[in-house]
Amino acid sequence: MPIMRIHRLSSLETLSIFIPMLHAKAHTMNALPHDLRLPARAIHRIADVAGLQLRCSEGTLWLTLDNDPRDVILEAGESFVGTEHRHAIVYALKDARLSVSASVARAEAAQPAFWRTAQHA
């Protein structure tokens, strides 16, 4: 885990503050797939939705993406696949369950080329 060092001068003394910083996608990427219960009016942030499938299995979710004029409402049983690198905010309109997993295209891209060729041949 990278460590970000912040150095500040105070009364001519150097103070060091060590803050552990994860890569912006590390938490979501390492924990896939994961399932979240969101109470009504809860917010969940996803640093990068590219290659992720967001599925609403209960309740209703409102999904908004940075620099995208569209908003997506997901009802139980519906899903959204991120195709572009964008920050997302998921808002629970009522108690909901959100499942986040790698999309099929992303899962196939993670396989070695010879495996993809053999599967489709």
Image: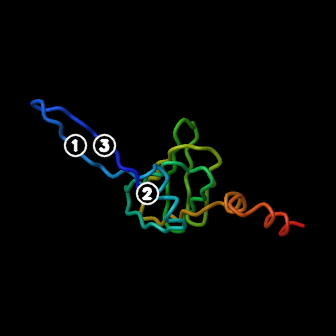
Q: Which mark is residue 16?
A: 1
User: Mark 2 vs mark 3: which is more N-terminal?
Assistant: 3
Image position of 89 with respect to 8: above or below = below
On the image, the x and y values in percent for residue 53 come to 60, 59
Q: Residues within 10 Å of mark 2 (few under 14, many from 20)?
A: many
Q: Which amino acid lies under the numbered mark 1 shown in the image of this protein? A: Ser
Q: Which mark is residue 51?
A: none
Image position of 118 with respect to 87: above or below = below
- The residue at which mark 2 appears reads as 92
On the image, the x and y values in percent for residue 74 come to 56, 57
On the image, the x and y values in percent for residue 65 come to 53, 43
Cβ atoms at labels 1 and 3 below 8 Å apart: yes
Cβ atoms at labels 1 and 2 below 8 Å apart: no
User: Mark 1 vs mark 2: which is more N-terminal?
Assistant: 1
- The residue at which mark 3 appears reads as 5
Label 2: state its secondary structure.
Answer: strand
Camera-side residue of 36 and 49: 49
Q: Residue at x 44, y 53 (%)?
A: 91
| 58 displayed left or right of 38 | right
Cβ atoms at labels 2 and 3 below 8 Å apart: no
Label 3: state its secondary structure.
Answer: strand
On the image, the x and y values in percent for residue 55 come to 57, 62
Q: Residue at x 37, y 56 (%)?
A: 42
Q: Nearer the viewer, mark 2 or mark 3?
A: 3
Image position of 87 with respect to 51: above or below = above
Image position of 110 with respect to 67: above or below = below
| 109 displayed left or right of 101 | right
| 52 displayed left or right of 64 | right
Quadrant placement of the C terminus? bottom right
Camera-side residue of 11 and 53: 11
